[in-house]
Image: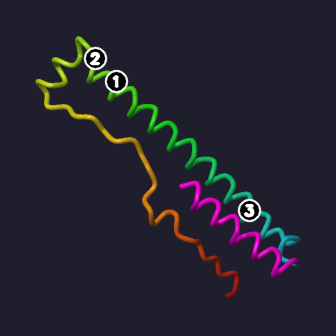
Amino acid sequence: MLKADEALNIAINNIEEDYPEITTTDLYKGLMDEYSGIEAAVTIARKNYNEVVMEYNNMIEHIPTVFLAKAMGLERIPEFKASEKANDSVEINMTN
């Protein structure tokens, strides 16, 4: 996911270089604030999910819960990892 974030930041920086006047508009500033908020929320959600998955996986592998987990057919859950497609460059079109 980090590579996708880097790609998006590079794309935004390229737009800023190509269109310096855009950085002064309220719309652009709002867009950047929204992007930062979404990026932070996704990072927190991914971290929280992986923490819960790690706790669950540890719980089902330790005594005494391992016996109940096996009886119920519970299995390990993989942690979230971004797909290779998430590392693709992001294209931003600022034209109408």
CA gap between label 1 and label 3 equals 39 Å
Q: Is residue 35 left or right of residue 59?
A: right
- What amino acid type should be assigned to the residue bearing mark 3? Met
Q: State which mark lies toward you, 1 or 3.
A: 1
- Image disc number at residue 32: 3
- What amino acid type should be assigned to the residue bearing mark 1? Asn
Up/down of 48 relative to 41, above or below: above
Q: Is residue 70 left or right of residue 10?
A: left
Say what secondary structure mark 3 lies in.
helix
Please tell me whether residue 10 belongs to the stretch shown in magenta: yes
Q: State which mark lies toward you, 2 or 3.
A: 2
Q: x, y (%) of residue 48?
A: 49, 36
Q: Residues within 10 Å of mark 3 (few under 14, many from 20)?
A: some
| Front-lying residue, 35 or 56 | 56
Give the residue at mark 2: 62
- Image disc number at residue 58: 1
